[in-house]
Image (spheres, rainbow, N blue to C red):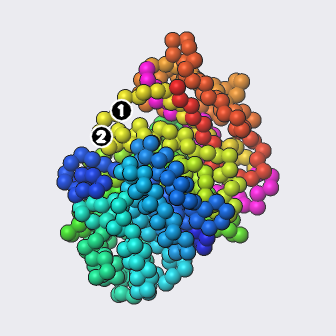
């Protein structure tokens, strides 16, 4: 993710990590073994400043008010080296303070972006992030845990800050440096072998499993390990479909993180994991080169997000909520990687408009409050009104783009040509999903959460209806969507439609 006017792509690392976490007491109190949890969203400050669409104080108020209304407790502010960083972060804290709704903020220091413009092995870079941290940790809206300001990172696992190694660098030049020692509760996302966590004594108060949102280790090349050798990725059998869903919904990697975090001495062992609705990016070498073989880690740039990933991941985390302190939603506004749930605003990364414009994702946000409440309370909330959420890609995965200089993204073969839908029903009813005059699925749904899907039809559309006692409660057929078998450009983002009663 991580975008700025001097954007640097650092890559996602499919690493293994963990921790045993006791729950947070509140967003501003000490962890005390209570039952409270937090849900926050990752907000990229690098897309809020500069250009013609820079955020104002009111823009931040709008974002905070909207997020708060959907059960989100705060923003993780992804900050880099941009010259507008201080101003925009200042607006965010001021907005939260003036709104007075208890919404919290904390810095997520983007060491990938910072390392692109500063020497990550220099003590001067450590001084930069200490100064940035100190500038905001005393603000009224700052998230505080154990009496200390909560601070996180994206990456940083390669930064020595002039010391002998990474472990010593983060200890001496950041968490235990006289400028900042005793002030912060530090929960970084370090992309390294998680068996090295124990070396971060005096550094890690917890762990943020950024890549927990996706199974980044599930690729076309190793699909046979999940599906069996010789699997036809275009025609999965029911048992193979179940195997994929089970893999995407597994808590295994989170558990590894939890176990390794438990080995860090004198740590609060705060565990923060992630949930995301999607992942796709299609930057070419003339922009950020994030389509195939990204630098430096050569990972795919579409992750398998089918099988109702957003909902399935929520269910997994809720089932293991006793081990998770904080859920971080990825993201509010990472348009370049297609996992945004907030409104499209600010400054898009150059080129991202090709797969973002016209692809609003706020339908995911509309159902987030239901799951956020469930996670925080441990009890599924009563559904007050019916919701029907649908999403689908805009063209078949095997379609040949007529005028795209780039190939389809690596691992596109894993995707399924399906219309995915989630129904939150106040009472039993019948849902019908339709993608053409001859393709539909009719399913009886129960009161509560329901997952439904149907095959997409080339040249077709998406439509969903909910009926109850022979009366149509919801009828959602969005304009502007067509499953185009002859696209000009490859686009593996999803079109999202939502309706509520």
Magenta-highlighted residues: 401-427
Q: Position of residue 480 (x, y in %)?
A: 72, 38
On the image, the x and y values in percent for residue 153 come to 41, 67
Q: Is residue 149 visible?
A: yes
As helix, strand or loop, the secondary structure at mark 1 comes to loop
Q: Label 1, on which residue? A: 381
x and y percentages locating residue 466 in the rendered image: 55, 22
Q: For residue 213: magenta? A: no
Q: Residue at x 43, y 30 (%)?
A: 449
Is 346 above or below relative to 341?
below
In the rendered structure, the answer to whether residue 214 lies left or right of residue 183 reads right
Viewer-side residue, 245 vs 198: 198
**Nearest the eye: 289 or 238:** 289
Q: Which residue is mark 2?
A: 377
Mark 2 crowd level (few <14, some 14–19, many ≥20, 10 Å Cα)? some
Numbered marks: total: 2
Looking at the image, residue 487 sits to the left or right of residue 435; the answer is right
């Amino acid at each position: 993710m991580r975008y700025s006017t001097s954007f640097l792509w650092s890559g996602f690392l499919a690493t293994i990590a963990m921790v045993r976490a006791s729950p947070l007491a509140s967003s501003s109190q000490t962890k005390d073994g209570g039952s409270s949890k937090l849900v926050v969203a990752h907000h990229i400050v690098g897309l809020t400043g500069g250009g013609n669409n820079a955020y104002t104080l009111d823009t931040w108020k709008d974002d905070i008010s909207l997020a708060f209304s959907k059960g989100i407790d705060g923003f993780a502010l992804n900050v880099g080296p941009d010259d507008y960083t201080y101003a925009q972060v200042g607006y965010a804290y001021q907005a939260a303070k003036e709104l007075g709704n208890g919404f919290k903020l904390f810095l997520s220091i983007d060491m990938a972006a910072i390392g692109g413009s500063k020497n990550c092995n220099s003590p001067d870079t450590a001084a930069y992030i200490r100064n940035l941290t100190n500038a905001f940790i005393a603000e009224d809206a700052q998230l505080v845990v154990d009496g200390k300001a909560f601070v996180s990172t994206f990456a940083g696992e390669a930064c020595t800050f002039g010391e002998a190694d990474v472990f010593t660098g983060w200890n001496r030049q950041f968490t235990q440096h006289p400028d900042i020692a005793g002030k912060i509760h530090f929960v970084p996302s370090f992309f390294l072998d998680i068996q090295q966590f124990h070396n971060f004594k005096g550094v890690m108060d917890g762990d943020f499993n950024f890549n927990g949102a996706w199974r980044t280790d599930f690729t076309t090349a190793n699909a046979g390990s999940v599906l069996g050798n010789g699997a036809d990725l275009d025609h999965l059998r029911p048992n193979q479909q179940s195997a994929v869903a089970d893999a995407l919904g597994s808590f295994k990697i989170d558990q590894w993180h939890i176990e390794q975090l438990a080995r860090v001495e004198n740590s609060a062992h705060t565990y923060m994991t992630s949930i995301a609705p999607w992942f796709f990016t299609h930057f070419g070498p003339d922009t950020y080169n994030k389509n195939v073989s990204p630098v430096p880690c050569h990972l795919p740039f579409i992750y398998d997000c089918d099988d109702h990933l957003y909902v399935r991941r929520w269910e997994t985390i809720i089932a293991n909520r006793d081990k998770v302190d904080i859920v971080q939603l990825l993201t509010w506004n990472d348009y370049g990687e297609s996992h945004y749930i907030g409104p499209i605003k600010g400054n898009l990364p150059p080129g991202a408009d090709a797969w973002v414009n016209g692809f609003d994702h706020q339908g995911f946000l509309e159902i987030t409050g239901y799951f956020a409440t469930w996670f925080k309370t441990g009890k599924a909330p009563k559904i007050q009104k019916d919701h029907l959420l649908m999403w689908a890609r805009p063209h078949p995965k095997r379609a040949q783009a007529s005028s795209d200089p780039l190939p389809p993204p690596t691992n596109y073969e894993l995707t399924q040509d399906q219309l995915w839908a989630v129904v939150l029903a106040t009472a039993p009813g019948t849902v019908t999903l339709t993608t053409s005059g001859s393709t539909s699925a009719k399913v009886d749904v129960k009161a509560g959460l329901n997952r439904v899907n149907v095959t997409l039809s080339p040249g077709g559309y998406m439509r969903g209806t909910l009926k109850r006692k022979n009366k149509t409660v919801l009828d959602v057929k969005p304009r502007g969507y067509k499953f185009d078998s002859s696209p000009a450009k490859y686009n593996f983002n999803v079109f999202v439609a939502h309706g509520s009663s």
